[in-house]
Amino acid sequence: MGFIIAIDIMVVCILVLVACRQGFERALPLAACLLVLFPEESKITIPGLFDLTTQRFILLALIVLCFTTGKRTKDGPRKLPLRAGILAWILWWGLAAANSVVPWVSVKTVLSEIFDFFVIYYIFCMYVSKTQTAKRVLFGIVTGLVACSVLGLLESYANWTVVSLFPRIVHRSGVSGSVYVDMSRGIRAQSTFGHPILLGSALAMTVPMALYLVSISRSTAQRWFLWSGILLMFACIYKTGSRGPWIALALSLGTLLVFNKARVRKYLVVIALLTVSVLVVRPGVGETIWNNYIATLDKNSTQGESYQYRYALYDLAVRELDRSVRRAIFGYGPESFYFLKITGEFNGRVMTFVSCDNSIAALLIETGYLGLLIAMSVLATALVRAYRKCRRVGPRANGIYLVLFVSMATFVFMMTNVAILGWGQENFIFWIVMALSMTYPRLAALEQKRKSETALARPPALVCVGESAQ
């Protein structure tokens, strides 16, 4: 407990120091890094009430600093983007909690969702007033994931996890504190994340950010750090042994290759050549990937059952909601799936569904058809706006817009693969990225307008008559 308290005091003091010396906005990139760095195990439990995680101490510090050192500028949005959809999300989850089969669990889940993620969205929407700050925030996220990659590779090669330094807890993926070992895939890197697939999802969201930052970096040291980080992240995502993040990363990089400017395309060609070289030098890597693919197609294998399980959850959710009109409307309550102990047939046998490895199905069964529609409408609106901005500015100037789009799209894609929504550090990445995607176009337009006005206001250079004659 003393170790966790020391961590909490340290991160809060660092944030306060940066905010007091350099301003609240300069503390946001550091906060983004710290939010993705610490595990769920870093928390102080208040029995019967809630947990004070390190992330919540960071949020409390940001809220206090917001009121004491934060300054809203005219460049920021006057009203919160997507406010109607987010308000509808909160209100509907409140109604679903009121009709929950486990009311207290659902109420705590709703409060956690508001405080942990919607507050982060608000802060990064309303207090980022410069495009440079947005890029620093992305750099902060990348730095945090590079550190997590180092820890993940340490698990794979040294058989030791940093989470063992923290008290053991029971979470959605089991008991923490030891290296994650899969019977069919061996040791799988999970770093400070709750599960290897969550780490893989965060890496798939972050690698495109690192490539973008390399393309705009003017510092040799920063470029070296980013390239080293990219290689570490690629190695770590492979070591997670998670098929969904592999596919998500391939789709993200493919999108960058098709729609982004030439410099990033060159980087992707280099990465492709390095990947081919690794497959040639280390044929076991390609064999592992191929075996996972074959096992996924085999319904009787562990990987095959895991893959089919995600689809079975849709049918299960529809069947349970059809039991009554009330449940179809409100669902069974946020975070209620694990208490339902639903029994059904899967792969030719009757079993109890103890986990919901699909956030779409979880939203459906826990908040009803309307709850799923509201949540997906908010996410779809953010994606559509980011996509339209990419199309509007064209491939030569859409670098950051495209990166924000593919990062959000990766998260939404992974919602069909794992229970990713509502817990874990990858959610902080998603809500920060969504906030930046909503505000960055306005900031860029205002800065471009000021540059144009400055250029027009500058007096023309005086030229001597003799010189003009020459």
Image (tube, rainbow, N blue to C red):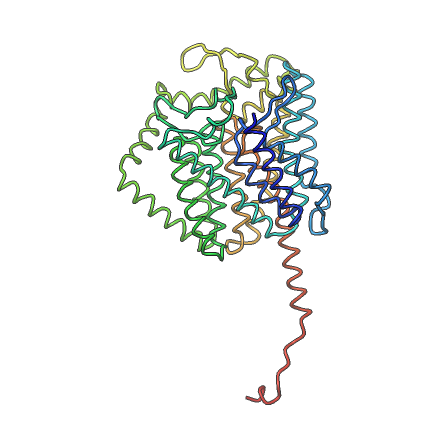
Q: As rendered, which of 15 and 86 lies closer to the eye?
A: 15
Among the 4 quarters of the image, the one containing residue 302 = top left
How far from the left and from the top, in percent, is residue 352?
48, 12
Q: Position of residue 411 (x, y in %)?
A: 52, 35
Residue nearest the viewer, comparing 3 with 401: 3
Question: How many marks are shown on the rendered structure?
Answer: 0
Q: Nearer the viewer, residue 261 or 326?
A: 261
Give the left or right position of residue 248, taking residue 133 as reference: left
Q: Quadrant of the C terminus?
A: bottom right
Where 244 sits versus 348, above or below?
Answer: below
Viewport quadrant of the N terminus:
top right
Quarter residue 118 falls in: top right
Residue 133 x, y percent position in the rendering: 60, 49
Residue 196 percent across, percent down from the top left: 44, 29
Above or below, 159 against 268 in this view is: above
> Eyeballing the image, is 320 above or below 191?
above
Lateral position of residue 34 relative to residue 21, left or right:
left
Residue visible at 53% across and 42% down in the picture: 141
Residue 359 lies, with reference to residue 211, above or below; the image says above
Q: Nearer the viewer, residue 141 or 82?
A: 141
Specify whether 141 is left or right of 378: left
Residue 82 figure quarter: top right
Task: Please give left or right for residue 333 compared with residue 404 in the image.
Answer: right
Residue at left offset 52%, top offset 40%:
407
Q: Residue furthest front?
A: 2
